Amino acid sequence: MQPNTDYRKNIFNATFLVIIITLFSKISGLVRDQIMAGYFGISYETDAFTWAYFIPNLFRVLFAESIIIAAFIPVYTLYLKKGNSAEVNDFVSSVTNIFILVFTIISAFIFIFSTPIGTLLLKISGSNFDISSFSAMNRIMIFSLVVMSISGLLTSILNSHNKFTVPAAAPFVMNAVSIVFVVLLAKNISIASMAIGVMAGSILEVIIQMPQIRSTNLKYKFNINFKNKAVREIFGMMVPIMLSLGAVQINNGVDNFFALSLGPGNTTALSLSWRVANLPLGLFSVAIITVLYPHISRQAADENQKGLKESLSLGLREIGYMMIPASLGIIILANPIIKILFERYQFTSADTAKVSGILIFHSIGLLFFGILMILNRIFYSFRNVRTPLKVAIASIGVNFLLDWILIKFLNVGGVALSTSIVGAINVIVLLIILRKKLRYLGGRKIFLSYLKIIGASAIMCAIVYYLWKFLVAYFSSGTFMLLLLLAITIITGGAVYIILTYLFKMEEVKFASDTLKSRFKS
């Protein structure tokens, strides 16, 4: 077997495993959201929780992920290649201890100022915000910033050692614990049960990864060595990367502020829509990138431009293969998806209409969000952090302007559409810049692949639309029947799409099919 085929087979096998595990994690996340929506609807309470969780998550992405995703993995991979265990241990221990120290200080600061932050949100909302609930839940969850940041660091270490299973399963633990706490405590302490579940779940995320960390032979030391070259290197990269990722989070914050200003429940509706849209994004795009990124980092370290281009082409084609039919399917079935997932108890049919409308606009950008993930990581693997930074900062102004314009016509749906448009603009700009750097990106191969994907997706969409219309007209009765009909429609649509792409002789589906056959035979 040729080396390139072996490489792609390893990528597929690892991605397939991550997708299966991520599927369970995403399903558990939807169950958690179902329970929250069922118990509390979309209201002042849920807006308070959404903001209380958004703030620690903002700082986690802003600081921790800027180091972990963009700086830590490429540097750690390079030092692993050198094989100096003492230097690696010193590097990892220093980064870990810096995380603990810095994020504890940030958490303590936010803990103290929770009430003033809540007062600011009250003013933005026009007195449609519960300060006391926000402050209480924010103080419960804020130290999850420390724990989730350490969990992310452990995940990046394990992924660098080609260990994907347990890290991919860690979010399942968070969701499962949150569900248990809501079911047991909601009657007594209301939505604060969600906050306690998040804190407990984040601790367990760290605990379940520790056994595999021991297998990496890393030795933790209680020290911070600022003289370590690797430590200086990643923290030197941190500021521009932090600003780049921070621009994305600022965009999310702007979106939430606009949603909050439109009245109670809109922030929660926007959040629920994004979580549903994030299911295929997290299931397929994140799984592909999780497996590809360590390979891309190694290829960049080896200055293997040919391999890097192949990885980029493979990533773009696989993301398109997954995300185009998924986004179109969600657009067609948005209302029944939201109805089945959330419409019960405190979550009304009016809430279903609102969230499904937002979901349609979020789904338009799914392909671009997936592609953006891999493009940013290509730049980071080259240690080029300034280009994504400049593009991301420019996107803040564009996003603010589009939010302001589009909510006048589409209400909170305009916020979601703005997000999708900004994602598309970012992708176009980064592709133009990357093509100048790498010259040949295999554009013809990618273009022909996307033509086949779009053709197969169009036929699939027609079948899904008319099949759902027929099934609902003749068989719809009750939630269980709707769920069954939706499952039949999705499975049929998926089968039609796979068959069509196989008939179109697409390399992506044929390779996956051959690999699966060999796995089952073995």
Image (cartoon, rainbow, N blue to C red):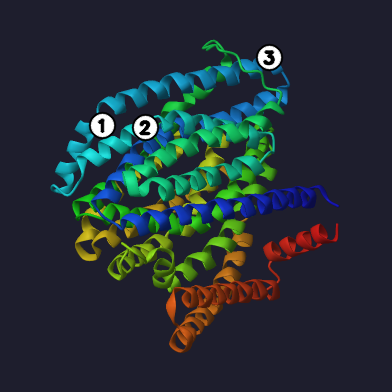
Q: Is residue 235 above or below residue 267?
A: above
Q: Amino acid at mark 3?
A: Ala
**Callouts 1 and 3 close, C-beta under 8 Å:** no
Q: Amino acid at mark 1?
A: Ser
SS class, disc 1: helix
Q: Residue furthest bottom?
A: 474
State the image coordinates of residue 412 (x, y, percent, origin top left). Answer: 26, 59
Discs 2/3, front: 2
Task: Give the CA separation, mark 1 to mark 2.
Answer: 10 Å
Q: Amino acid at mark 2?
A: Ile
State the image coordinates of residue 421 (x, y, percent, origin top left). Answer: 36, 57
Q: Pointer 1: what residue?
A: 114
Q: Pointer 3: what residue?
A: 86
Q: Pointer 2: what residue?
A: 142
Query: How many numbered marks, from 0 up?
Result: 3
Q: Would you say residue 400 is visible in this rendering?
A: no
Q: Which of the 4 image quarters holds residue 120? A: top left
Judge from the rendering whether residue 387 lies leftward or rightward of residue 440; answer left or right. left
Q: Residue at x 64, y 49 (%)?
A: 18
SS class, disc 2: loop
Q: Is residue 447 above or below residue 400?
A: below
Q: Quadrant of the C terminus?
A: bottom right
Judge from the rendering whether residue 285 lies leftward or rightward of residue 406; answer left or right. right
State the image coordinates of residue 335 (x, y, percent, origin top left). Answer: 39, 71
